[in-house]
Amino acid sequence: MNGTIGAKLRSGILCFILLICATGTTSAQWNWWNFYDISYQFSPSENASRSLKNGAFVLGQYDLFTSYNIDNRIEVLAELVFEAPGGELEVDLERLLISYTFIDLLTLEVGRGHSPLGYYGNTFHHGRQLESTINRPLILEFEDEGGLVPAHNVGMWLRGFTAGNAGVMDYTIGVANGQQIDADHGELALNLNEDDNPNKILFGKL
């Protein structure tokens, strides 16, 4: 197990320890969801790999998602994704958020979450059973899958909503660590516990 996987596992374990420590609250509610997929891939193309030419069953992601409502205002949310591209186990801590809801119009969130990129990115997370298409749209693909824009951020943000006769209006505004381009792998790289550039990401959605 390399250092990156070990660090992610340690972060995930810490998250679950925090959740367990909160179980003393009588009004708490703990929810768990599990998502998994397996596919069959085949291609007759001359440029396809030997495995694709023969046809192969391919293990997808195992998505372990949990949320813990300490009370009616405080929630802890964590999401771990296990996958094995190329036969090697990878573990990603996709989301780790602590939120406090003052009123419907004002909720403070801190941690790692999804960027507020329109409707799709915040409605369809990890776990293919939740998505409305076979694959994610390219522009909303995740960083380690060749995505064009940052799909995750580490920082803090405010969000809320209000409902009226004309419908529902919601907003999100926040600040997060600046991100960098991993030139060796040609992908965006998150600054999880540091920020190696002088700029922060400012974002908002209405």
Image (cartoon, rainbow, N blue to C red):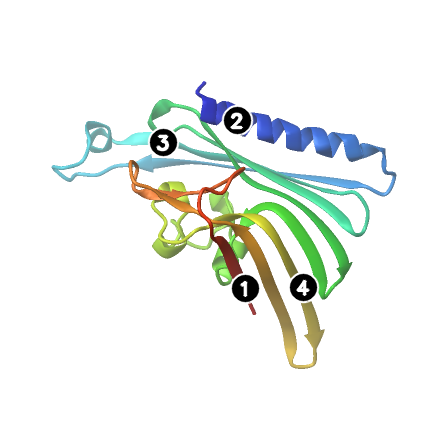
Kindly identify the amino acid type of the residue bearing the numbered disc 2: Ala
Task: Quadrant for residue 69, please give it.
Answer: top right
Q: Give the Cα distance between marks 1 and 3.
A: 38 Å
Residue at which label 3 appears = 58
Badge 3 local density, few (<14 within 10 Å), some, or many (20+)?
Answer: some
Q: Residue at x 44, y 20 (%)?
A: 2
| Sequence-earlier tag: 4 or 1 | 4
Badge 2 local density, few (<14 within 10 Å), some, or many (20+)?
Answer: some
Q: Give the Cα distance between marks 2 and 4.
A: 33 Å
Residue at which label 1 appears = 204
Task: Quadrant for residue 23, please give it.
Answer: top right
| Sequence-earlier tag: 2 or 3 | 2
- Tag 3, which secondary structure? strand
Q: Nearer the viewer, residue 45 or 103?
A: 103
Q: Is residue 59 above or below residue 203?
A: above
Q: Mark 2 and 4 residues: CB-CB less than 8 Å, in contact?
A: no
Kindly identify the amino acid type of the residue bearing the numbered disc 1: Gly
Kindly identify the amino acid type of the residue bearing the numbered disc 4: Gly
As drawn, the label of residue 7 is: 2
